Structures are given as C-alpha cells and as structure tokens.
Image (cartoon, rainbow, N blue to C red):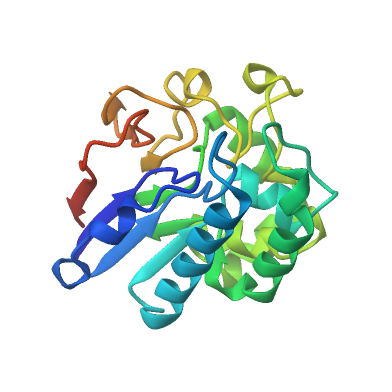
Amino acid sequence: MKHIFIGDLHGEDFWKEINVRKYEKLVFVGDYADHKTYSDFKLFKNLQDLIRFKLRHPDKVILILGNHEVFYKYFPQFQCSDTRPTMQKDLTRLLNRHKDCFQVAYQRGNYIVTHAGITNAWYADFARFPFLEKMKQEYPTLADQLNKVDQGSERYLLHTAGHARYGYGKGGITWADKSETSTDMLAGYHQIVGHTVVPEIETIRNGDASVTYINVAKHNGTFYELDI
C-alpha cells in the first residue's frame, strides 16, 4: 500500500500540491495551526480545508493529532507554548465538531505513526496500567489502544511533556523529543514522526526498530513516501 507522510504544517498549505490519486494513504503527522506570522484567518482556513479534504477522502486521509491540537481540543486540560489565544475558542469548537476526523496513532503492520514518537521508557510506564490488559483483547494493535485511550479520562498518559520539552518525567506520544526517541526508540516498531524540527528527512535505526523524522524545517517539496 503506497503511503505519503506529511510533516507538521503550522498553517502551510503545501499539502495541496500532492496528487491524491498516486497514493492509497495520505498521513499527516499533526500540528496544523500556530504559525508565528500567519494571520488567524489563514491558519483557520487551512485547517478547515484540511478537514474538508479528510471528509472527501475519509478512508485515504489520516489526520494525526499533534501537541498543538491536543492543547486546543481538550482546552484547558493541557498546556502548550506558541499558541494563539485569539483562536482558542474557534479551534476548540472546530476540532471537537470534527473529532472523528482525527486520531493520535496510525499503524500498518509494525509501522506506526504518532506526532512525536514512542520510547521504551514511556511505553513501560504506560503498559503498567491494569486497564490496558483488558483493552488489548478488544483493541489488538498498539495504535488502536492509543486511539482508545485518547477518547477517555486516561488520555493524560499520552500527552505528557518530558524534561527535554520542559516537562516532567518521560515524553508521551505528542511531546517526546528527538533526543528521547533517537536513543530509546520503541523496540520492534518502525516509527514515522514529526514534532522535532530536522534539516532534512532522517531515519535512525537500532536493531529491529527505527524512527523516521519528517518535520523538515524548510519544506522543499519533499515528502516521505513508503510502500507498506
């Protein structure tokens, strides 16, 4: 299945250049708003267009929640820097109105996509919670489990910022820094993530695991493509 993965947008509309017919899945890794200079109108319209795109291609387009969307969607439960107070009410309303368009994880085989990535240390803590064992019977894949947890009161487990991002403990799936995922990537999985800015698309491997970072600082028309 031919996939194309699109890094953090932050209001950019370069995704509209993609030829949809070429791919079976278009996976966006999150952070759709909160550009430093774009107007509120431009940011809001771009996210509206992206949601309409998802609604036109519901099975083909995957929209992953980033830490910025988590801030707005669940406001005021989570904190995030460089957000737009002037847009909070509108974005909170928009994201919740179209909550079924978004998810925190996508998986195909042992390839998994989250906004920031998964470390062994974070997953070890997450897996200790008793509710997860029961959940695994109904939701067999890791992505299914993460998406289910995000729908309930335990979602705080997913959206923690670690020391590298001025938080406490270990970075969760929307906050983990490259310094965490590159040195402690989840064993047995090939991850595709955004969040940490990189100069170019980069893959780091360790045994049976890898992480590909696709949040390129200056978009030059290059997307990450993979047949899986």
How far across and how far down the image is residue 179, in percent? 49, 17
For this orientation, the residue located farthest to the right is: 76
Q: Is residue 199 above or below residue 117?
A: above
Whether residue 9 is visible to the viewer of this picture, yes or no, is yes
* Front position in the image: 71 or 50: 50
Q: Is residue 108 above or below residue 226?
A: below
Q: Is residue 76 above or below residue 194?
A: below
How far across and how far down the image is residue 138, in percent? 59, 73
Q: Residue at x 67, y 27 (%)?
A: 170
Q: Is residue 64 left or right of residue 59?
A: right
Q: Residue at x 72, y 47 (%)?
A: 71
Q: Is residue 145 left or right of residue 198?
A: right
* Front position in the image: 74 or 47: 47
* Front position in the image: 130 or 88: 88
Q: Quadrant of the C terminus?
A: bottom left
How far across and how far down the image is residue 226, in percent? 19, 51
Q: Residue at x 62, y 43 (%)?
A: 67
Q: Is residue 17 left or right of residue 189?
A: left
